[in-house]
Image (cartoon, grey):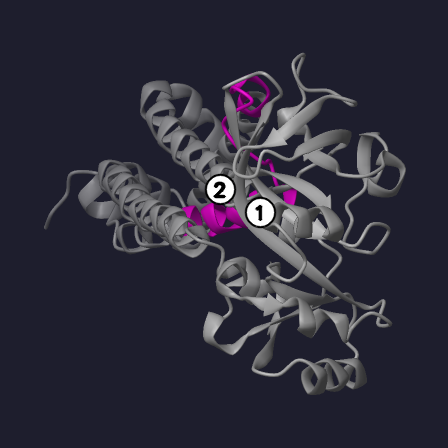
Amino acid sequence: MYFLPFKEMTFFKVRYLLISFILFFVAILVFVISGLANGLSMNNASSIINMPADTFYLQKSAEGRIDRSHLTTMDLEKLSAKDDAQPIGIQMGAISKVNSEDKLDITFMAVQPGSFLEPNVMAGKGLKGGGENSVLLDRSLKSGAIKVGTIVKDARSGIKLKVAGFMDDQTFSHTPVAVISLDTWDSLAGSREKSEYNGIVMNKDDSGLKKDVSSLVKNGEWVAKDQVIKGIPGYTAEQNSLYMMLSFLIVIAVFVLAAFFYIMTIQKAAQFGILKAIGAKSSLLVKLTIFQVILLTIVNIAAAVVFTKVFMTVIPDDIPFIFDTAQIAKFSGILFLVSIFGSLLSVFNIVKADPIQAMGRLE
């Protein structure tokens, strides 16, 4: 009896092609929006996401936002011997090539050279090997005009910086990150006395060290890494908007698929009645219908996954898109359950199909 779903799909090609297109395009929309959400998330906060950090010590008044937190140089001098607790400075800025008026928006990130906060380089050298006033740039800034050894200058102070190397996936608030040393950070501020930092980062959960830092630096609080990421300007609103779109899309898919399967079972009421007349049980017909839905869903979701993978390779590089296998698997499972749920709503039509009415006898 399990050959019946295949025979029906080959006979009513147009009908099942329409359902397949709906499943296929809904899955594509879900996967593409999911990829964009992941891409925008990384583009907005990859420097913090990829940072080997556990918790951040920020000003209480900053409410978990690292860009609003300010610590003085005197606060940080107390941490000189604590390698597992490192200061960090973050500030939006701009750089340009020497003798060029074209400015590039970046985010300066000040770290101690050689500490756990310094990102790995994909090309060139680290801050220690780069010399005085060296800078590490995100790879998105790598071009024919800017390469290892190029001299750039800070647009605000005019201080010249030498590009020592390039890093992978280091962005903050949708701008490339420029990692500099704490000494260079002080120079950009004018002097060490005028310099301010944004927080203290700890790379492991050490309650004793937390107490030490809290006692040395007052008016601060420990904030989890996830909370710092959510506090990046625009991050939460951006992610909530995209995932709300995904939620509405899945809800719409439930109603659309349920309506299609419901109408189809109404149209097949006579066929179900005849099958019952020749001995088929309602439970078997329900199983065959669900088997048909499972087959259609698996084929179309698999096709949508392949399409999304290909789509990722052809979109422009300036569109942030990440094909997250775990996320795709999660949404595939949700779409699969949605399709099954939509088909279950039409079970009532299968159960109530009357064999006598199907054969044209109403008495």
Examine the structure image and report whether residue 247 is included in the region drawn in magenta: no
The amino acid beneath tag 1 is Gln
Residue 284 showing in the rendered view = yes
Q: Nearer the viewer, residue 169 or 239?
A: 169
Prevailing secondary structure class for the magenta stretch in the rendered image: helix
The tally of labels here is: 2
Q: Residues within 10 Å of mark 1 (few under 14, many from 20)?
A: some
Between 80 and 357, the one nearer to me in the picture: 80
Residue at left offset 44%, top offset 38%: 33
Residue flagged by tag 2: what amino acid is it?
A: Ser
Cα gap from disc 2 to disc 1, whole angstroms: 7 Å
Residue 356 horizontal side relative to residue 245, left or right = left
Q: Residue furthest left?
A: 363
- Image location of residue 295, percent across then percent down: 52, 36
Would you name the residue on which mark 2 appears? 34
Indicate yes or no whether the magenta region holds residue 322.
Answer: yes
Q: Earlier in the sequence, mark 2 or mark 1?
A: 2
The answer to whether the residue labelled 2 contacts the one labelled 1, judged by CB atoms less than 8 Å apart, is: yes
- Residue 151: image quadrant is top right
Pick the residue in front: 193 or 232: 193
Magenta range is 311-340
The crowd level at tag 2 (other Cα within 10 Å; few <14, some 14-19, many 20+) is many
Q: Please tell me whether residue 340 is drawn above or below residue 78 in the rendered image.
A: above
On the question of residue 1 being in view, the answer is: no
Which of the numbered marks, if any, corresponds to residue 96? Answer: none
Q: Secondary structure at mark 2?
A: helix
| Residue, disc 1 | 327
Where residue 134 appears, x then y in whole percent?
A: 77, 36
Across and down, in percent, residue 319 comes to: 49, 27
Q: Secondary structure at mark 1?
A: helix
